[in-house]
């Protein structure tokens, strides 16, 4: 039997209080979130 996995590779959640959201998701996911660098050639912050 061939099982296919449907995993999420990327998603964005817009928040007003980034520090609060980061603390919440780090606790819920039990991992440390880190800021990704802006890809070369992309203007400013995304």
Image (cartoon, helix red, strand yellow):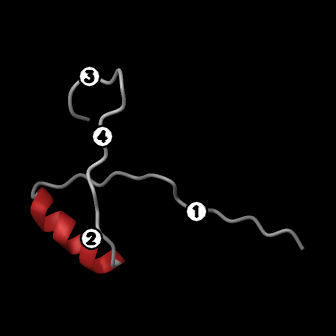
Residue 12 to residue 44: above or below: below
User: Residue 13: horizontal and vertical position, in percent?
Assistant: 29, 55
Label 3 or label 4, whichever comes before in sequence order? 4
Where residue 30 sits, quadrant-wise, is bottom left
Residue ID for mark 4: 37
Q: Give me the residue at 79% from left, 69% from top.
A: 3
User: Residue 36: horizontal and vertical position, in percent?
Assistant: 31, 46
Residue ID for mark 3: 43
Label 4 or label 2, whichever comes before in sequence order? 2
The Cα atoms of the two marked residues, 1 and 3, are separated by: 29 Å
Task: Name the one closer to the observer, 41 or 9.
Answer: 41
Label 3 or label 2, whichever comes before in sequence order? 2
Label 1 or label 4, whichever comes before in sequence order? 1
Left or right: 1 as drawn, with respect to 41: right
The Cα atoms of the two marked residues, 3 and 4, are separated by: 12 Å
Q: Quadrant of the C terminus?
A: top left
Instruction: Find residue 7 and name its label.
Output: 1
Label 2 or label 1, whichever comes before in sequence order? 1
Task: Name the one closer to the observer, 15 or 9.
Answer: 9
Of tags 1 and 3, the one toward the viewer is: 3
| Classed neighbour count for the residue bearing mark 2: other residues with Cα under 10 Å, few (<14), some (14–19), many (≥20) | few
Label 3 secondary element: loop
Left or right: 20 as drawn, with respect to 11: left
User: Residue 28: horizontal and vertical position, in percent?
Assistant: 30, 78
- CB contact under 8 Å: marks 4 and 2: no
Residue ID for mark 2: 25
- CB contact under 8 Å: marks 3 and 2: no
Q: Give me the residue at 26% from left, 50% from top.
A: 35
């Amino acid at each position: 039997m061939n099982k296919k996995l449907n995993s999420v590779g990327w998603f964005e959640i817009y928040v007003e209080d980034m520090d609060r959201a980061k603390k919440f998701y780090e606790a819920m996911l039990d991992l440390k979130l880190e800021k990704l660098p802006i890809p070369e050639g992309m203007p400013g912050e995304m």
